Amino acid sequence: MLGFVPPLPQQPGRPPSSGHMIVCGDDALGRRLAVELRFIYGERVTLLLPPGRDANSPETPLTQRGRAAALFGRMSAAMNRAGNGNGATGGGDTNAGVEAVRIMEAPEPSDDVLEEAGIDRAAALALVYDDDERNIRAALTARRLNPRLRLVIRLYNRKLGQHLEELLDQAAAVAMPGIDPALLDASTTVLSDADTAAPALAATALTGSSKIIQAEGLLLRAAERPPPRPGERADPGLCTLALLSSTANDPAGAEGSDSSGDEAPLLLPDERAVAETTGRGTVVLEAISRADPARPAARMGGRGAPLAQIFSRRLRWSALGFALAAVALVVASLLTTKDTALHSAYLTLLDLLGMNDPAEDAPPARQIIQILSGVAGLLLLPLLIAAVLEAFGTLRTASTLRRPPRGLGGHVVLLGLGKIGTRVLVRLRELDIPVVVVEEDPEARGIPLARSLHVPTVIGDVTQEGVLEAAKIYRARALLALTSIDTTNLEAALYARSVKPDLRVALRLYDDEFATAVYRTLRTAHPGALTRSRSVSHLAAPSFAVAMMGRQILGAVPVERKVMLFAALEVAGHPQLEGHTVEQAFRAGAWRVLAIDATPPADRNPDLAALPPFDPEGDTAPPPSGLVWDLHPGYVLRAQDRVVIAATRRGLAELLRRQRSAVPGR
């Protein structure tokens, strides 16, 4: 099924040398992370997997070890082909002298298992199990066994992750009283693969969407721009981050990846490449704006509700018409009877409610007004009854899921409300995009969120006939198939295309070979529609790998099937940066210096991705950012500088390897 994979050398009885990295996981993210560390960063890796088959893919005949070995084999073969094709010498081999990944199997990362994996001599440990509780338990055990260990933990619960990070850092500080604060900042990192991948997955449903990177209270927007017309020059913005592949804007074309050759997107091109390239879209750093402070989370639902959600529009218009009629009667009474305004309103109200005496001795004008008021009062009774019935109906359905309304169109159909689907739903609602959710399990993780956000939801198996029709797929703008089963996502996409051939489809797929086959099939069958696939593990693994290296990752921006990283680095220890100008430090296709932190080292914020604290009274303005973005090309980078860079995965790995080799005794 996956082809022949040569056996990897295993050393189960040989203890690993010091400075290696341990990855513990039970799904695709653990395997992808091991590949990233081994083949991109050239690290020695021990991969700890549970025995047996993958619980998320029970239909595959391979065990966890078999799937990992197959992935490593394909990656090794691809690296060898790339090296032979480029004519790289041994000095350019980033993996020369690095042992193959050591694979271990154990049900739980217990004390004995971690000790066998060499936890006491390891440089970093990644806990990327799908279960938050297992990751927390293993993190506490690892911190006890090795207080100096760098921990990278995968947690879906963000608030719990913040508390756990503080707890484990405090434990490291107590165990090592003289630890460097800079080392303590990188001692424990809590990440969420759902938060990392959700913006990219949501962006696939849109055309020309932007990716947001946050740094010291500032928002950086990386925007896709279409190819310029003949005779026009593309606006580079602040800088051009990437050139899209020549087929990126062609519905019949496929997205480029690392194995696409000349058709692949070009990350971090120089000015000459941008000027000479025609017919290709670009990704540019478009704007920088101040981010809002981290305000307390607003309640998405509560006991109260606005009138627009309690009463229908027709009832509100009827109530407005009745109020205008009552005002007209008061004005008419005021003009005809020459009475005071207060007394005229009082008499009109009594007439409307049928509580006034007949105006037998009054002038004819007063009698006519009383008759008209009585007729209007008859209309008040059904209006009140309708209001009561609608209020009771709203209260009765407040705890139920909303059905897709009639006439809905131009929305996004989201399949799956698991961890990933829930985060994508939040992202789409933040962008004010109408969404209809399809979920098979009524007790899924994201169902309460969909209920509180009043998102139309269809409960049912997407593979069953009539479910997608209930989600109004024939009037939708895009389909996001984000279930954890590749075949389910593919079946939903094929059925949706049979209903609406020009539908924009984004699939969540893990296996690259399977994704390629999907591309070819859908491209041939529906050449006029856009089809994209995204792998959550592929999007999240670079961020976890950078955290394993002890560096701060500000964000990851997908460029088709490649990933560009934004990171904060200290210039000291990087020979390619220190002592060079900004122009000289730029390496096309590897890294680019975007900003310099001008704040004195003693006053710097250790976390550039953090927002300034929220001031509830609003009396104090947020502190000014120390980042300087408008850099002069001739500025010389000093050792005490901290810079924000955009880098490719291999470019950032080269910078970190150079710094590691420059540190004595490492």
Image (cartoon, rainbow, N blue to C red):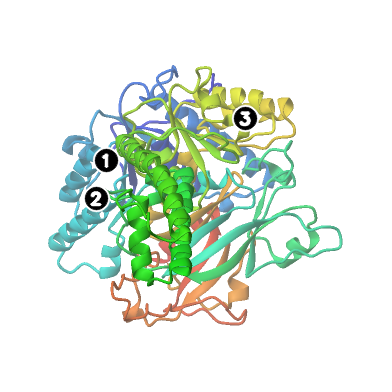
The residue closer to the viewer here, 665 or 449, is 449
Q: CA distance from mark 3 to mark 1?
A: 38 Å
Residue 132: which disc? 1
Query: In the rendered structure, which amino acid carries the disc numbered 3?
Result: Tyr
Kindly identify the amino acid type of the residue bearing the numbered disc 2.
Leu
Q: CA distance from mark 3 to mark 2?
A: 41 Å
Task: Note whether 366 is above or below 631 in the view shown.
Answer: above
Image location of residue 19, percent across then percent down: 32, 51
**Mark 2: few/some/many CA within 10 Å (<14, 14-19, 20+):** few
Residue 82 in view, yes or no: yes
Counting every numbered tag in the picture gives 3
Q: Identify the residue under disc 3.
A: 474
In percent of the image, x 17 and y 35: which residue is there?
112
Q: CA distance from mark 2 to mark 1?
A: 10 Å
Q: Earlier in the sequence, mark 2 or mark 1?
A: 1
Numbered disc 1: secondary structure: helix
According to the image, label 2 marks what residue?
160
Task: Decide if residue 311 is on the left or right side of residue 171.
Answer: right
